[in-house]
Amino acid sequence: MPRRGENIYKRKDGRWEGRYIKGYDENNKAKYASVYAHTYNDVKIKLFQAKNNTQNKELNGKDEQTLMVYALKWLDNIHLRIKHSTYVKYANIVNNHIISALGNYKMCELTTENIREYADKESSFGKINTSKGLSPKTVKDILSVLRLILSYARELGIEIHCNLDLISIRSATEDKKIISDNEHRILLKYLLEEPDYIKTGILMCLYTGIRIGEICALRFEDISLTNNTVCVTKTMQRLQTLDEHSKTKTTITITPPKSKSSQREIPLPTFIAEQIKRLSFCPQAYLLTGDINHYIEPRTMENKFKSCLKKCGLPQYNFHQLRHRFATRCIEAGFEIKTLSEILGHSSVNITLDRYVHSSLEFKRQNMNKLQENVV
């Protein structure tokens, strides 16, 4: 079967057709050509050979090619080597930002200065009306993808006249709103009253730091009530469908987590294991529904969480704050940082400390009071 987004289709006459970009016209509009075969694998080989032949023909005068040409070539080159979710993110950045703003630049015309001007123009930092600009995070993501495209062009022998390492994007430091101790107690009381599948899922995230996509993909068979552990091996996402022939704009996918370190086994507090035992379920059922065939997707789960907060009379936190709350409480309880990092599924302890640990005022006061121990 063809891969998602791949330009290979089975024709009505039984043959397979593969389409590829053979060049671009004076307006940088792609011109397509096709190859045919009786099997999917044969047409895939022919398509690969045709693309290579096209690329070899373009080597003469390659510095005159535009950034758009190399951006699209780069996307095609990485398509089968990265996760589909990552490819969707890269494709959106290329199509929605890089091509529209910088795509007509010839490779020999790209400089550090004109890319810096673009980044400063697009960034919302320092602007009164921030809705007219992109967030600093988005601009940084664009520059990261652009750096990968230019690196790919260098491998093809293109001389690049810019250095993106010289471009820095400023961003305002935001005070992150964190679930307080009192809010935690109110939410916990609500979750323990008349437990159901949704409440149990929220409770588990509050005490394990599991991501929203991971809890949505979790089935009862991933939980051991003998050892009181949960194995995180999958995540659920709603991704944009890049296939132009698809009938839907987005689709739900369940894949392995974002990184190898995200596949982990987490010990469960005893009271959570006891609450799970009160639910009726079969091993193959989803935790959030108790049903084998029906799941709750992340966007719906986010809404259900906010509904719970409303019933509790609490502020409208996003679901990810459960993860922040868990990490902060673990640090305040004296968790060894390496252990916490592995429970959260981070590849580095620095990520745990920089992004997920927020010390409360009371915890700061307790630590400051320790200085009095040696005062005479």
Image: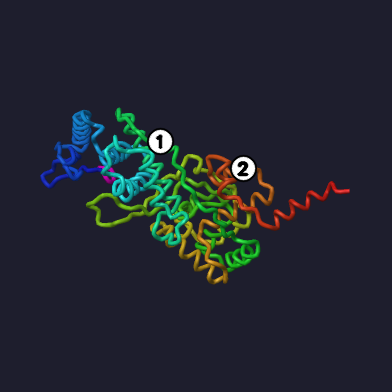
**Which residue does the numbered mark 1 point to in the structure image?**
163
Q: Residues within 10 Å of mark 1 (few under 14, many from 20)?
A: some
64 vs 127, left or right, is left
- Taking the magenta stretch, the answer to whether it contains residue 60 is no
357 vs 375, left or right, is left
Q: CA distance from mark 2 to mark 1?
A: 39 Å
The N terminus, quarter of image: top left
342 vs 123, left or right, is right
Magenta: predominant secondary structure element? Answer: loop
Q: Which residues are magenta?
A: 1-5
Give the residue type that dot 2 points to: Thr
Residue farthest toward the left in the current orientation of the protein: 13
Secondary structure beneath dot 1 equals loop
Q: Residues within 10 Å of mark 2 (few under 14, many from 20)?
A: few
**Which residue does the numbered mark 2 point to in the structure image?**
339
Give the residue type that dot 1 points to: Asn
Relative depth, front residue between 31 and 335: 31
- Residue 183, by quadrant, is bottom right
- Residue 135, by quadrant, is bottom left
Q: Is residue 334 visible?
A: yes
Q: Where does residue 227 sit, x and y in percent of width and height?
A: 59, 47
